[in-house]
Image: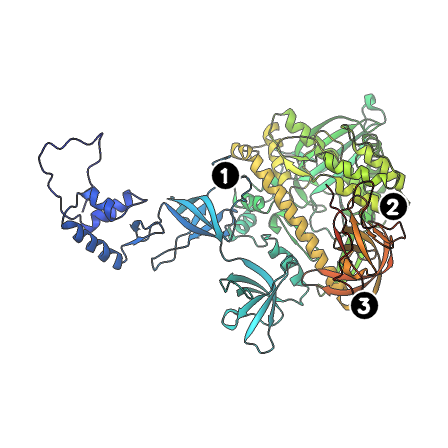
Amino acid sequence: MPSRKPPKKTGAAKKDTGSKKKARGLPSREEVLAFLADNPGKTGKREIGRAFGVKGDDRIGLKQMLKAMSDEGLIAKDETKSLRRVGEMPPVTVIEITHTDTDGELIARPVSWPGEDLPPLIVVTPDTRRGKRDVDEPPAGVGDRVLARVAKSEDETYPYEAQVIRRVGKGAERVLGLFRLTPKAKTARLIPVDKKMRVEFEIAIEDIGDAEDGSLVLAETIPGKRYGVPRARVREVFGDIADPRSISLIAIHTHGIPDSFPDAVIAEAEAARHQGLKGRTDLRDIPLITIDPADARDHDDAVWAAPDTDPKNEGGIVAIVAIADVAAYVRPNSAMDREALKRGNSTYFPDRVVPMLPERISNDLCSLIEKEDRACLAVRMVFDRNGNKRGHEFIRGLMKSAASLSYRQVQQAIDGNPDDATGPLLEPVLKPLWDAYRILAKAREARGPLDLDLPEYKIDIDEKGGVGGIRIGEKFESMKLIEEFMIQANVCAAETAEAQHRPVIYRIHDAPSREKLVALAEFLATLNLSFAKGENIRPANFNRILKAVDGTEHDQMVSDVVLRSQAQAVYAPDNIGHFGLNLRRYAHFTSPIRRYADLTVHRALIAGLGLGKDGQTEDETSSLTEIAEHISTTERRSMLAERDSKDRFIAAFLEARIGAEFRGRIAGVTRFGLFVKLNDTGADGFVPISTLGGDFYHHDEILHALTGERTGKTYRLGDGVLVRLEECVPVTGGMRFTLLEGGSEGKPAGPRPRSGRRPTGKGGSRQGEKNRKPKSSPRKRR
């Protein structure tokens, strides 16, 4: 039956001519439902009555009809007391963001849903009101409740879409932790793995699910009393916390790293087939080789070099860097592409890798396996005898790796100890590569990039997944060879994209801020080292300082402070250069298997140079700013997850050695105590200031030191110390030490320093007198 709609209002209301308007009577139920569908918003009994001309006694009948429709589940009131059809969303309502989908979209459900069916899924669209949202208000995320404008969509999976108006509170939060049953087994406790969460949660027996004592679980907070122990319920069980494999799982789930591929992504990867020679340059006769860590699972870059035969470039070289052609398999906006963008990069843990792309791509089709044909995007570069680049060109080709070698193999071969694999390659391949590297090193030295040499600790995993040992990673000059070849290829990529007027994501690194430079100069002055902090600061300024302290007792301390003064490198479509490398143009090109940034650069080059139809699209071009911001965030997320994982593996390794003594150095100084890094394992632990004893300690931010008010005993960044391990918590990675030896005698800090910059903060203790207040507290830095 067609609905009888009320007449539309046209213009101003006409004057009453004296003729009384006849009431239209009650509308039918179908008419009411049609009116509610056409008029979402603040629609109640009064608005319905006016629309259908309901007057007099009919108003009572309308009220009874609406109540009956409500009782029958046909209509309902929303949060604003407006009527709406059951099964439909009001235009403005409160929703709770529950998760993200495989495309990284925020997905929500209505907080209030009167129907018996499951509430509909809602996709949260970006807020396009640029500049109107409070800049201090963080964007809404999973677990938030928000007031949102809701509209129907044509998507069957997500029938509604919403735009956030404002946040109205947090919904249930997810907490990863250690599940513990209490002795009487009437309740259980959840101990969060996050060191920053200093509270435990109570779990009722009916909420423990399949969890057992000692399980690693993902729990969900539930409302409880305002005061007392917060409550939670178990949502997922990951296994025994004692299982070494749980350590990486903690980092993966704590930092929200996607670790399983959707079925559509796997299917797309499995359907991919090897690229042939069609439309490509044949590079299979060139003996390109891959040089990687011994335990590398994929090989995405290969190198080759030889003397330039051009008589106009005497002493010069020709070099080729060939990179796996990931763009040929991962097309823009495909399922694999969306998942790769969501992850942003691969994440590496001591016992596993969470890859950006499925293994069919990363370990097979796009891994430059020895003696196998592989599609590649290569750059051929020509340098003069001093390492200055004369020219370059990009080639989309088909290559065949002559050998897959490790850094150690190559280094031993060059040092005169070749093995069966490197022996036949020494003269025709490895020595020309080494000669080319020597030439490139000349230009690098002239360029003067920041030269920080910091130790890297490696965790060896045994057959059971536990820590077999921890060691300082080996460093070979062959690593520098590959690094320099990759840098040159990245520079070529940035230059070519710019020359072709293709928008591209650069790898940028800003110069240190003025504030950090001033703080560094003040610190170096305490070591009688001068540091020019003018406007034309360059990496060479830092290198001179590092060279001046090399081999002295202060070398590690100064390296740490210089590192802390540097800005964070990020991705951006606007180029400001790379300060640390001292390069004007730089874009990541050499690792598209594990970095989404590199894949976007490949596509820009393909489009700009006309190397295929699978290059950069207009949609990708218009989204580069958002992509760059996102992958900068995922990169930081992975760095934090990798660091947390290493901390927990190391803590698990040292747990059996509580009470043992270790040599280390002070790696951080705060007003609460000292952070100490152990020499042998790189383990980080804390020495609380209350355990130093015997004095009240002032914290000096400039000196990076704690100094005794009475004794002058000073503990400074970089000082060597002897500590005893007192506590070790693998589930959080936390360790606590007691200081046995270390520090230096100095001038007492005194209660009120009278000259120079004043130390900041306060803290300290005397044994047995922890609550005694000092006669005078140090003043705060202004």
Pointer 2 local density, CA inside 10 Å: few below 14, some 14–19, many at least 20: some
Q: Residue furthest top?
A: 312
Disc number for residue 554: 2
- Would you say 471 lies left or right of 590 here? right
Query: In the displayed structure, would residue 99 be above or below residue 379?
Result: below
Q: Hey, what amino acid is under mark 3?
A: Gly
- Provide the residue designation for mark 1: 133
Q: For marks 1 and 2, give the CA distance.
A: 48 Å
Q: Position of residue 609 (x, y in %)?
A: 62, 28
User: Does residue 672 appear in this view?
Assistant: yes
The answer to which of 144 and 595 lies nearer the viewer is 144
- Residue 72 seen in the figure: no
Q: Residue furthest front?
A: 775
Neighbours of disc 3 within 10 Å: few (<14), some (14-19), many (20+): some
Q: Are marks 1 and 3 in contact (CB under 8 Å)?
A: no
Q: Secondary structure at mark 2?
A: loop
Instruction: Name which residue lies at 28% across and 57% down.
Output: 73
Q: Which one is in front in this view, the residue at disc 1 or the one at disc 3?
A: 1
**How far apart are labels 1 and 3 at the CA level?**
54 Å
The residue at which mark 3 appears reads as: 659
- Of the two numbered discs 1 and 3 on the same chain, state the one appearing first in sequence: 1
- In front: 551, or 136? 136
